[in-house]
Image (cartoon, rainbow, N blue to C red):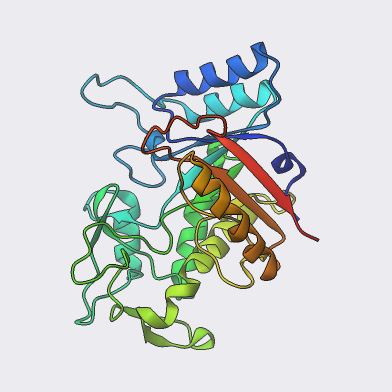
Amino acid sequence: MPPKWSLGYHQCRWSYASDARVCEIARTFREKNIPCDVIWMDIDYMDGFRCFTFDKASPPSLLEQFPDPKCLVDSLHQNGFKAIWMLDPGIKFEKGYFVYDSGSEKDIWIQTADGKPFVGEVWPGPCVFPDFTQSKARSWWANLVRDFTANGVDGIWNDMNEPAIFKVRFTVTKTMPENNIHRGDDELGGCQIHSHYHNVYGMLMARSTYGGMKLADQNRRPFVLTRAGFVGSQRYAATWTGDNVSTWEHLDMSISMVLQLVIDRKIIRLWILCLINLFHTPVSLFVSTVWLLIHI
């Protein structure tokens, strides 16, 4: 079961660029007496979109954007809010970045057909990707999540975990090549190409994130949201129907999507209408609205 606080109203959009803006949003909700229980932080809180980091000084202003995340979360908690933070699977391909260095040391990246770490471009630029089909990769990720929650993290949002890739050559799927290599655990199917494991990648990431939150606090119910899932992923995470815009067409499409999610018996689903309103459409009635459907 999800934590009780997750059943309330969530304020989520792309994106808040500083802790000052987050505090302003929280303060405005309380001043206007609008019920709200959760505020979400998209990738702009990160240092150059590097997972498990915080933006301490952003060019060109070099102002501190999230200088003290623990202090921010403490302030939100004092005002009755929980805080959810995004983590993507793409890890910036950069020596000296502690997440990349530790993953390389443990040799846990998905490989190309010729046995080299696959590098694909997403938000941070060139990235490598954890091979969550390996128990050592799941343990590595879980320990990073455990340490990350020390900043006061209440929940984690796993995005881009199909996994999505920008500028993919020779394919329209916007994911990694099907002949990439996963060195999976024997009980999962062993060493296989990506097409074999693609549909479970997001679930295995969510499972690892959930495990990390349990390592941090065995007595707390984790809240994890995942964009990609599979049958059984409801044990670890809620699922949402993906990014969309505030149009009547997308509102209509969401109904069948949520009903199909019910069929696979996901316990809790989130449909976030206009999580990312890329086109600034005039139908703003539903912007940043979260609809929550409970199926028992």
Residue 42, given in percent of the width and then of the height, sits at 44, 39
> Measured from the top left, where is residue 290 in percent x and y?
62, 40
Q: Can residue 147 be seen in this view?
A: no
Which one is nearer the viewer's eye here, 258 or 189?
258
In this rendering, would 262 be left or right of 115? right
Residue in the picture at 66% in, 16% down = 30
| Above or below: residue 198 compared with residue 216 | below
Between 139 and 65, the residue placed more toward the observer is 65
Work out which residue is located at the far right of the displayed protein and give it: 296
| Figure check: 112 above or below 262 | below
Can you say which quadrant of the picture contains the C terminus? bottom right
Residue 184, compared with residue 94, is above or below; it is: below
Name the image quarter holding residue 16.
top left
How many numbered marks appear? 0
On the picture, is 55 further left or further right than 62? right
Q: Position of residue 172 (x, y in %)?
A: 27, 67
Q: Residue at x 51, y 29 (%)?
A: 284
Image point 29% across, 57% down: which residue? 101
Seen in the picture, residue 133 relative to 138 is either above or below; the reply is below
* Residue 178 can be seen in this image: yes
- Nearer-the-camera pick, 292 or 230: 292
Q: In which quarter of the image is the N terminus?
A: bottom right
Q: Residue at x 34, y 59 (%)?
A: 102
Name the spot of residue 146 as percent of width and height, x first. Answer: 55, 51
